[in-house]
Image: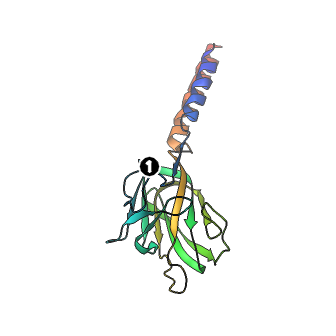
């Protein structure tokens, strides 16, 4: 096998090794009432002090929320993630019901409003018609997610829960420096082959 063929094969192996690992956090393994902190190796959960994030039970499975399901919830990822999606559970209000602060590489990248569909108008997620699918897959390198300003509606069912956090762990896009080194290596091999000819 020629050097060039070996170089190309090695380069493809290098690039393919950058593939991310898929992860799903769904809280099914936790009994209702468990304080959720660092039970999952991919992320740490916390709430605005002095409140905590805990698991809640329902007929179709577990989900999490802060005290009263109205306190801020923070998720710190142990490694940058991409393709982040999850479910907002039991939204029972119309209009702005929460905000998501998305941090990419430890810097605030965006604040996104969650607009509630109202009673029985949601997307029909894992728990029913009041659940909404949240898609933050447009952000690469998410290191923290803050779920804040959760609506406390005295006329409706208070609060919102969160479930089925799905994401890819690791870099899904090679860093520019890695690509530059790969390109220089291939160019050097090409020049070396050309000089021998």
**Residue placed at 31% from the left, 72% from the top?**
50
Give above or below for 5 relative to 33. Answer: above
Spot occupied by residue 120 in the image (x, y as percentages of width and height): 66, 74
**Residue placed at 43% from the left, 74% from the top?**
68
Spot occupied by residue 66 in the image (x, y as percentages of width and height): 42, 69
**Residue placed at 37% from the left, 57% from the top?**
37
Which quadrant would the N terminus be assigned to in this image?
top right
Count of numbered circles in the view? 1
Compare residues 142 and 44 and report the one nearer the observer. Answer: 44
**Residue placed at 57% from the left, 62% from the top?**
87
Quarter location, residue 92: bottom right
Tell whether 128 sits left or right of 68. right
Compare residues 64 and 109 and report the one nearer the observer. Answer: 64
Looking at this rendering, what residue extends furthest in the left direction?
A: 50
Compare residues 48 and 154 and report the one nearer the observer. Answer: 154
Give above or below for 106 relative to 90. Answer: above
SS of the residue under disc 1: loop
Spot occupied by residue 49 in the image (x, y as percentages of width and height): 33, 71
Give the residue at mark 1.
42
Tell whether 186 sits left or right of 158. right
């Amino acid at each position: 096998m020629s050097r060039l063929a070996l170089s190309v094969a090695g380069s493809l192996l290098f690039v393919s090794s950058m593939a991310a690992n898929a992860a799903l956090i769904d809280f099914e393994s936790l009994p209702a009432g468990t304080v959720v902190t660092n039970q999952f190796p991919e992320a740490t959960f916390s709430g605005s002090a002095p409140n905590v994030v805990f698991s809640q039970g329902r007929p179709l499975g577990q989900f999490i929320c802060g005290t009263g399901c109205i306190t801020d919830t923070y998720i710190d990822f142990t490694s940058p993630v991409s393709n982040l999606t999850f479910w907002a559970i039991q939204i029972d209000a119309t209009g702005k019901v929460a905000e998501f602060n998305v941090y990419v590489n430890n810097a605030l990248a965006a604040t996104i409003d969650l607009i509630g569909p109202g009673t029985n108008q949601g997307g029909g997620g894992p728990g029913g018609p009041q659940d909404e699918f949240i898609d933050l897959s447009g952000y690469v390198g998410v290191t923290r997610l803050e779920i804040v300003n959760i609506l406390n509606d005295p006329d409706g069912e208070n609060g919102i829960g969160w479930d089925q956090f799905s994401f890819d762990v690791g870099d899904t896009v090679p860093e520019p420096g890695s690509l530059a080194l790969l390109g220089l290596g291939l160019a050097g091999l090409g020049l070396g082959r050309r000089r021998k000819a």
